[in-house]
Image (spheres, rainbow, N blue to C red):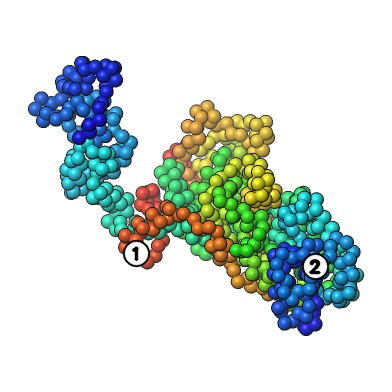
Amino acid sequence: MGAGRTVLVTGVSRDLGRTLARTLAADPGIDRVIGVDVIPPRGDLGDVAFVRADIRNPIIAKVIAKEDVDTVVHMSVIATPGSAGARGTMKELNVIGTMQLLAACQKAEGLRTLVVKSSTTAYGASSRDPAMFTEDMEPRRPARTGYAKDVVEVEQYVRGFARRRPDVTVTLLRCANVIGPRVVSPLASYFRLPMIPTVLGFDPRLQFLHETDLYRVLRHAVREDRGGTFNVAGDGLLMLSQALRRAGRPNAPVPGFAFGSLGSALKSVRRADLSPELVAFLTYGRGVDTTRMRSELGFEPQYSTSSAFAEFAASLPPAARRTERVLGSLAERLPAVDDDRPAQLTLAGGTDG
Amino acid sequence: MADAEIIPIGTRGQPGRGAGKRPSAAARDLAPKSGTPRKTPARKPGPAAGDAPDASGGVAPGEVAEETAAERPARTLKERPAAEPDAEQAAAARTEGRGLSPLAGIPAGDWLAAFQHASKELFGDQWEPQLARFLAFLRRRLTGEYAVDEYGFDAEVTERFFMAALRPVAQKWFRIEVRGIDNIPAEGGALVVSNHSGTVPVDGLMTMVSIHDHTGRFLRPLGADLVFRLPLVGSVARKGGATLACSEDAERMLRGGELVGVWPEGFKGIGKPFSERYKLQRFGRGGFVSAALRTGVPIVPLSVVGAEEIYPLVGNIPSLARLLGVPYIPITPLFPLLGPLGLVPLPSKWLLEFGEPIRTDEYDAGAAEDPMLVFNVTDQVRETIQQTLYSLLMQRESVFR
């Protein structure tokens, strides 16, 4: 491999794809980067050559053949219909687009590496989930609709492709929810709501991946030749209640049965998109095991879940934090204590009968 | 002085009997004869600060009820340190300033004194650092600056709140007696296997608090998926250290060196009728044994006596249970007959006996794949618990003693 590589990146019209394409173009080991999408990118593409093509039709095969592409980074699986229009269009983009792209890849003789950005949504979220999903686990409740189903289907096609072209290194990255000051995603817009609804009586475990780490891991996967499926997430977990406290956001618990209709109300005013899989995630949460990411992929994220969220939270409008200020001023009047672990209160009786 | 015009009810503002200008005859009789003449007996002094019931004898009937809510907490705060040396000082301050607005009546110094007394009562002499620690704790909870592990276990809140709330129940209500606590290893993974009973999984909670109090280790219970489907119950269970009873989680926890608790009888054990008390049900499919065999941790059998009697299950409403998607709707002699009062568990005397650990690290690597061996070990654990239950029942004097 080494020098003289040509990388094709799909889905460059969106920020994540565009920024990745630019980062790859800046990499000395990579000769050329071609960005593909149906609509032109919103921002500056830098050294990236943009080809306006729809991955849903066979033109993409010609692009791959003509440009002698050896690496394809598939970024075009979208979580929200948003810009694409209706759910039908989104499904077509995700599933049919991936099928066409993989068909084209199968024909391309010179192809060496395929990197697909998938999502931990593939594992679903339910009350029957194990605490931490490893890469070989299946979702406990197979997704029947929406993005989660798209992700599962895309992964099936990718595995099929890997079987048919064993000479191509296929890296499937299941990334946890990407978060960062500039990220636009259903979860990020959820956290940007002025009053955050939570599901009454549930406190999901959340895991985040910082956007910088997403670019880093994709670049890492392009550079190194490590095939396989990997969970990618920051270290540690945050409970939703804990995350909201850290961000100082006010929240309102909503009973589970009303949460879905609230989601559609928010969607109709274009504030947030609480899709069924996001609702399930915000109810039961999810954790993924990242041992293989370290041992086999050899990738180490810079941000932990909590530091990624802290950076995101810093970009939100500052919170009032009244109670905290009161407690803080009270604490200043008292002598400083070195260890702030309080001793057991003696109110509730002794420790032993 | 309060100069609000008080118009007594019932006289349409006309002076006369009970017009409020003078105390009524009944009130005059009540008042001590030599008592200091009150300056404005008729005018209610408003919600005067520190209007203690013993301040003066002749309290007009309406006055007691006139106390504002703002005054009440102030008094309860004050009454507590009454035995302290400077209580008189506080009392002196209290009688001044009658008729001012309720809050203005209490000087800031008094508030501070009351606060200091309350703190001293709560935290002892070392109250300042103690309070500072408590504040630090509160702030940490408010800002979310605490850590949870990958199962959602919040050690701090478990130790400070859940355990503190359960401890009096364990010690005072059930008077739990723990035996064989040395059988729990001081460190490293171990699997505590217990019988399950009592209609509501109180035995699990009591086992958790007993183990924590005697060894300092947290028991990590494995719960049915129903637990995690229920709102509130599921999130509290995760915060308390529970996770789903599945082989992946069990093995992950045991590999991580945790002390894991399982109740293999599940709903069959907890929801069995009272007539079948202390008869162990089927021990599932022996999944807990394979988990222990794969991770090579010891199995500690635990027999709990007493939990069967807390809610004697005499009936069930299967149709309603099916409708609600729960395993059973219990009927006990007190529930639902007495309503919420029926939810109070009977104060039976509990015995917890931890048995000799059963080692699993001596089996070879493929042992977990050998169903016969798994069944045998499962039976061994089950028999141990059943025999211990019988011997504990023999030793028990009565259900409540």
Q: Is residue B311 depicted above or below B17 in this figure? A: below
Q: Are marks 2 and 1 in contact (CB under 8 Å)?
A: no
Q: Nearer the viewer, residue A33 or B281?
A: A33
Q: Position of residue A95 (x, y in %)?
A: 82, 57
The kind of secondary structure element at disc 2 is strand
Mark nearest the camera among 2 and 1 is: 2
Q: Which residue in the protein does label 1 denote? A: A336
Q: Chain of mark 1?
A: A
User: Where is residue B27, by image quadrant?
Assistant: top left
Q: Is residue A194 above or below residue B306?
A: below
Q: Going 89% across and 66% down the picture, which residue do you hit?
A: A59
Amino acid type assigned to the residue bearing label 2 in the image: Val
* Front one among B22 and A127: B22
Query: x%, y% of residue B354?
Result: 52, 53
Q: Quadrant of the C terminus of chain B?
A: top left
Residue drawn at (26%, 51%) of the image? B112
Three-letter residue code for mark 1: Ala
Q: Is residue B188 left or right of residue B317?
A: left
> Which residue is identified by label 2?
A36
Q: Position of residue A44 (x, y in %)?
A: 71, 70
The furthest residue to the left: B34
Bin the neighbour count of mark 1 within 10 Å (Cα to Cα): few under 14, some 14-19, many 20 and up. some
Give the SS element for disc 1. Answer: loop
Foreground residue among B271 and A96 = A96
Q: Position of residue A286 (x, y in %)?
A: 64, 56
Corner quadrant of residue B45: top left
Q: Residue at left 30%, top 52%?
A: B119
Q: Is residue A132 visible?
A: no
Residue name at image x 66 percent, y 59 percent: A184
